[in-house]
Structure formats: C-alpha cells, structure tokens
Amino acid sequence: MRCGSGKAGPSPRAPRHRRRERQDVKTVTAIREVRAWRRYGRGSVGLVPTMGYLHAGHLSLVDAARRENDRVAASLFVNPTQFAPTEDLARYPRDLERDTRLLETAGCELLFAPTVEEIYPAGFQTSVDVGTVAAPLEGARRPGHFRGVATVVLKLLGIFRPDRAYFGAKDAQQLAVIRKMVRDLDLTVEIRACPTVRETDGLAMSSRNVYLTAEERHAAPVLHRALLAGRDRWAAGERAAEALRQTIRSVLAEEPQVRVDYVSVADPETCRELETLAGPALLSLAAFLGKARLIDNIVVGDEPAPRD
C-alpha cells in the first residue's frame, strides 16, 4: 500500500538506511526528551500519531514512515479534549505494554507516551478551530471533537518537528481538518494519508472494534458492503448524490443490528454535501452496532475504482 500527500510533487526520497530488524523502542513521557531525541539525531523523521491500542492499520503507517524516512517516531496519547462527556474516554482500550511490543516489531525508534498534564499543563487555554471543514458530519455529531484533534496534532507537530506525519484514510474528515490546518498555518510538515486497512471481510480496522459482540462483529461488514454498493452505482454512471446516499442506506437497512447515524456524499476536501458529482466524492457513513460507533468511507472519482 502506498500513502499519498494529497498534492502533486515528487515522492519522498528513500532513507539512506533501512533497518528492518526488530529494535527496542525508546519510550519517553516528557516533551524535553522528544526534543533531545530530535535535536541529536540525523536524517528525516516520520511521525505516527496514535491513541494506542494498535492494530494492523496503525502498523501500516509505521511501515510507510520507515520506507520514507530515516527515523520513525510514534505518539500514544488518548486525548481527552476530543471526547465529549457522553463518549467513551474512560473505557477507550489501553495497553501500553502490548503497543510497545508491536512498535518494536514494526521498527519504530521512539514512543512518546505523555500524561494529560504533560500535554495540557495547568493554565493551558489555547485551542485550534479550523473552520467550516470541521463543522459537518463528525463535527456536527461530536461538538468540539475537531478542536481537540487539531489542537493536539498541532502540539505534536511542534514537539516533534517531523518531516512527514502519517494518518489513516479511514478518518477522512480528520485528515481534511489536519490538511487544512497545515495549509492555513504554513506548516512545513508533509501530511501523508495511507489506505484504510481492512479485515478479510471488509470491516475497517479500528481500536473500537473491540467493543463489538460476536453477533455485532458478524454484522459489521455491512458498512463496507454499503459503501461498495454506492461506489458500484457511481461506476455505472450515477452522478446524483442523493441516489448514491439512498443506495448506501438501503444496504444498511438490510442489517437489523445497525443503527445509522449518517450517510454522506461530500467533497473530500471541504466535507460539504454534494448534489451532483462532477469530480472526486467522499462516500462516508457512521453507524452504531451496540455500544460501538464505527465510521468508514470510500473515495470515488479520483482514479479508477479498485476492487476492495
């Protein structure tokens, strides 16, 4: 799988050294330790920000970072400011020892696992609001979510000063928010988007999949099937956005375990809903299966649609 920057230009140069063997991860908790690691090392740095409880999707980001940089770092921080009071902050899965082992195997060199107080010390008041791209979809249903995301990502980019930062395409609106922030604030980092990693039955990998019961897990692949149905109708020539939404909804309705939150056909860069498709479009959805709220998406129109 290849990651993309979302802009034209040459591919990142290959690092001079590619060490694929397992190595110990240096785990640090203080910002000053990250800055010392950055200051005294040489070569390009790729950063993989995470909230932990890693899966193969996260590890694909680490792998991409290793291919494109001399050194790779990851952050592990369950960011409280992107959770609403009614959301799953307290029960979000955590396992630092497990995640460290996975990062060692993947070839990550530095893991930054700060406390909340390290990121948000007493008196912290600054936040980042990126505007209209954060307003619809996830932003409408999770007020303040993207303010928390943008703020913590900007902090991490300032702490690490990476050459490239890696994010998964599954969180498409988050990716749009981060790219908008980087453009507007003239940050020098390159944002690299990597393809969604899926289970063999099509379910997008997510740390929240652990919430699913066996019955819910059996039903969950309908999310991807619904998006594929929308893409197939687009491939057959349909360009009315509402017709594509209805196709997606009709597939979701076949599964009684699913409670739909939203179905969207939007501009991939602005996340504004479309009426007619005249270029790329982001087909996305959010749905509840029991206690788990899952999201997924497919982009159509930027290249010939692959068979997932």
Image (cartoon, grey):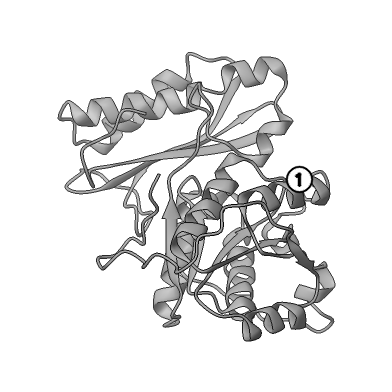
Amino acid type for the residue under numbered disc 1: Asp
Along the viewing direction, whichever of 89 and 165 lies nearer the viewer? 165
**270 lies above or below 255:** below
Local crowd size for mark 1, using a 10 Å CA cut-off: few (<14), some (14–19), many (≥20): some
Q: Position of residue 109 (x, y in %)?
A: 66, 64
Q: Which residue is drawn at 71% across and 51% down?
A: 52
What residue would you read off at disc 1? 88
Which residue is depicted at the point 48% across and 13% down?
Answer: 254
Give the quarter of the figure containing the N terminus.
Answer: top left
- Residue in the picture at 45% in, 82% down: 185
Point out residue 186 in the picture as x, y percentages from the top left corner. Answer: 41, 83
On the picture, is 208 further left or further right than 173? right
Report helix, strand or loop for mark 1.
Answer: loop
**Residue 139 picture location, percent across and down:** 54, 55
**Residue 259 showing in the rendered view:** yes
Horizontal and vertical percent position of residue 161: 56, 79
- The front one of 9 and 18 is 18
The relative height of residue 159 versus residue 211 in the rendered view (above or below) is below
Query: What is the quadrant of residue 150 in the picture?
Result: bottom right
On the question of residue 174 being in view, the answer is no
- Residue 172 appears left or right of 305: right
Image check: 46 left or right of 231? right
